[in-house]
Every structure is written in structure tokens, then in C-alpha cells.
Amino acid sequence: MILMQGKGVSRGVTGGPLYFFRRSSGEVTQRTVEDIEGEKARLEQAQAQSVEQLEALAEKYRAESGDESAVLFETHAMFVEDEDYVDCILSALEEEHCNVEYAVQQAGEQFAAMFAAMDDEYMQARAADIKDITRRILNNLMGVVEGGIDSEEPVILAADDLAPSETLQLDKSKILGFITQGGFGNSHTAILARTMGIPAICGLGDALKQDYEGRTAYIDGETGKVCLEPDEITLQSFREKLAKQEQMRELMQTMRGQEDVTLDGRHIKLYCNIGSPEDVSAVLSNDGQGIGLFRSEFLYLAASDYPTEEEQFQAYKSVAEAMGGKRVIIRTPDIGADKQVDYFHLTKEENPAMGLRAIRICLNRPEVFRTQLRALYRASAYGKVAIMFPMITSVWEVKECKRACKSVMAELTKEGIPFNPETEIGIMMETPASIFMARDLAKLVDFFSVGTNDLTQYTLACDRQCNDLGKFFDPHHPAILRALKMAADAAHAEGIWIGICGELGADLSLLPTFLAIGIDELSVSPASVLPLRAAIRKSIAQTCTLEKLEG
Ligand code: PEP
Ligand code: MG
């Protein structure tokens, strides 16, 4: 038996084979090849494999989301065998005697550049499709596993740590839990695990060895313990925990359909955080009453070029429709810091968390901002969409955001495109400046949502990505709770509501404090909704105190 101790960042117990995430270097180098016929055969095989994958994806999307999504994959499948594209690859093979990977990459770059240079905006956007198709053929040539997991049965996924863009590619149906060498409670692996409602442990360091691949592991996301090939006593204790977990799940199902109200009649909205339209099914199955934070940057992270207005519109519309008139708060992209997107070409910064990120990028790049706002307003005709701006520090930023919204609404009106002119606008309260300016900011918006992850980072001067800060990174710090109260008082004085969408919102031990402060909404991972509802329904708001705000 081997025991490892890490930090539990998503609760739950599970057991299964350990599997290490396969990461491709993605690098293609040029080699001289004599056997050109052999390279051609490899190309044919990779094309056939790509077409097969794309047809399977089209079938899956047709069943889940209808024809519109499926057509994209069918078009990709056709392009894999496009005569001009294939001719371009074959000529490179014959003329340059190079390896097929290099020929495919060159053809992809050439075609993408050709589309990008076209006048028509629709054709320009096809450059991203070519890059996507080329990447797929290359992956098949190089044996890179789609979804990162080449296993028939579900696994406990191990990694050094996962980048946000890597978590997006994972085949989630194959993951029982996550364990990582690095990482931290606010990392994207942790957030993804909580959204999926599966256990995760980070910070295992060198104790987690690649040699353990394939061995049976049991993990406990509460205690942070990982056990390989447990002895009988340890196994028995895991089994007991698993049985309890199952019982708890069944008990929580009785909370479905119940109101989010305390014993003395205080209502609180229980919404969910999501990163992609795929996550909506978890929101619905956990009975979330709305979406309090749709991190739209994940659409950008998943793409190889700026997502077009149409692509974004389809994504936002599908979420708005699926939520059937319940509020869907979509946050404009929080790119930068830990979420880097290559095609944004951001300058390397010494302190990216304090650099050009989030709303600062949007205000500096009005075209990127406008494209997204157009997609958001168009989607507002299909449900209760609200728009939220991250990393606000100043009144002028909010005014500028609102000016951009107005200008987009004027454009859509002129073009006769439907939208909801009453679309709510909110801001994230995640910088100390926003707390100090709360009263002025509240006059300009419809709601506040407190991002406690960043608020903790900036208020306590603690890097949220640093593993070694331990007790110094303390979201329970009275400074954070007082900041929450200051923001809530300002919001209520100006007649708007306030929620929490940072990870702290799901912290059951703070629920009485949130009730005493008067928080109106909690946006949490879908798996946290029913346990929170059970706790709210047992609480008496009037007896809750502010004692945790004392130093
Ligand atoms: C936060 O900062 O609390 C938040 C919800 O935003 P993110 O974690 O995406 O920065
Ligand atoms: Mg944040």
C-alpha cells in the first residue's frame, strides 16, 4: 500500500485505475523522407481516422443539440478530403521529400492565411476551421490522444497540473477524479472537478509518480488522501465512505424542487457557475435556479482563433434557451493572468494578475469587445441573459462598458435584429478598489457579484496560484468578510442585489455570515446547490451574526 497526502480541493471519494494525462508537444519538425509512398499511405490513414472522428462528433451533436452544431463537423469532415488542400500536401511531399506532418502543417498554414486575407468576414472566420482540421489530422498522424485519455474504462486522471485549455479538451465521461502534483484550490482543475461534482486532490508533489500508471487508487477529496492498492482495513474505510456518499446523494435528491428559503422566510437565489454550454446539464440536474457566472473566456480558450459573433451567439443562445427563462449571467472574457490565449498575442508581463487582463483587454480592443457584445445582445432575445464585467476598479470603466453596450444596441436596432433592451448589466466585485467605490458603482449597474477568488488575492496580497502561501491565503480573513459587507451595504443602499460567485460562496461554514451580511445570491458549482439548499432551509436568518467579521 502506498499513501500520498495532498490538498483536497473537490469533495468526494472514488476509486479506479490511475492514468496519466497525455500531453502532446504539438511540435512538428521537418525531416527528409525517401519513402514518399509510405508518407502518402500515412496521410490516407490519418484522413480516414479524422473523417471517422468528425462523423461521430456530428452524430453526437445532432442527437444532443440539433442540426446546426452537427453541420460544422460535417463540413470539417468534407474539408479533410478537399481536393486543393490534399493536392497542396501531396505536392509538398513530392517536391520537398519531407515528412507528411510537415507537409500537412504547411498546407494548413497556407490555407488558413488565404482565408484570413479574404474580404468577406464569414470567409475570414473559416481560417479557424482550417487550423482545427489541420490540428486534428496532425494529432492522428502523431498518435496524440483526443480528449487526453486512451482508456476504455473511467480513470482517476493524474497530471503535473492542467492548463485551462487542456481541461477543455478532456473527455469528461472517462474521469472519476483528478490528482495533480501541483495546483491549488482555485486552479482550473479544481474548479472543473467541482463543476463536475467529482473528487480532486492537488499538491501531491513528487510523491505522485508516473510509474503508478495503471495501479488502482482510492482518493478522498475531503482529506486529500490518495491510497494505492490499499490494505483490507483502509479499503473497508473507503467502502464505508463511498456508501455514505451514495446515501447522501440520495438524501440530497429530496431537495430538488424545494425553495431556497430559510426557516424565517429569507429567500436567497442559488445559481451555478459554468464554463461552457456543456455544463448546463449539470445545472439542470442539480436544480440550479439560474447561472450566476458563465466564464465566457472558455469559449476563447477552446478556439484557435477569435470566436466569431455567430459562434458566440450560438453558444450563449443555447445556454439561455436551455435555462428556460431563468437568469443567465454571462461574464465578458477574463483572459490574461492564468488564462492565456495564444492568438491574443498578449505581451509577456512580470505580474500578469495585475496586468492587462479581463475588462482591460476588452476596453483596449473595442472590436473584440463589440463582437462579443453583439453576440450577447442577440442571445438576449432567447432567454433572460445578463451581462457582467470582470476586474472593475473604476467608475469610468463601467461607463465605457455601458457606452459600448448602447452602441451595440443602436446597431442591432438599425439592422432590425431582435434583442432585449432591458438586459441587466452587472459587475464583479473582485478588486479592493471596487469595494471602496461600491456606492458609486452601484448607481450604474443592476447587480454586483463578488469574485472572492480574486478579491482574496488582491486584498491579502496573496497570489492565488502560489502553492506555498498556506494559511496566508485565507478567504475567511475578516478583511474579506468586511469587504463583502461593505459591498452589500452599498448595493442595498442603492437598491440593487448582490451575490457571490467566487469559490467561497459554497462554503457551508460561512452561510450564517452571508445571511447576516444580507447576500442575496450564491453562485456555486452545480454539485454544491443541493447541500447548500439543505443548509439554507435549516437556517434562521435573524439569528445569524457578524461575529466572523471581528478581527
Ligand atoms: C473570482 O475571482 O472569484 C471569480 C469568480 O472569477 P475567476 O475565478 O474566474 O477569476
Ligand atoms: Mg476573478
Image: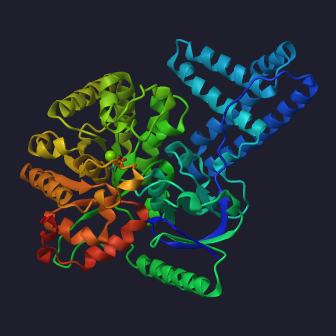
Q: Position of residue 361 (x, y in %)?
A: 34, 29
Judged left or right of residue 32, residue 419 is left
Specify the quadrant that holds the N terminus.
Answer: bottom right
Residue found at x 26% / y 41%: 423
- Which residue occupies the foreground of this view, 297 or 225? 225
Q: How many labels does the image show?
A: 0
Specify the quadrant that holds the C terminus.
Answer: bottom left
Q: Where is residue 444 in the image (x, y as percent from the top left)?
A: 14, 39
Residue found at x 79% / y 34%: 47
Judged left or right of residue 377, residue 17 is right
Judged left or right of residue 147, residue 311 is left
Q: How is the image coloured?
A: rainbow
Q: Looking at the image, which residue sits at the far left?
A: 493
Residue found at x 45% / y 61%: 194
Is residue 445 visible in the rendered image? The answer is: yes
Q: In this view, does 311 lie above or below 107?
A: below
Q: Where is residue 279 in the image (x, y as percent from the top left)?
A: 48, 54
Judged left or right of residue 36, residue 353 is left
Task: Indicate the quadrant where residue 178 lies.
Answer: bottom right
Q: Where is residue 513 in the image (x, y as percent from the top left)?
A: 19, 68
Q: In this view, does 240 lie above or below 195?
A: below
Q: In this view, does 157 lie above or below 113?
A: below
Is residue 417 visible in the rendered image? The answer is: no
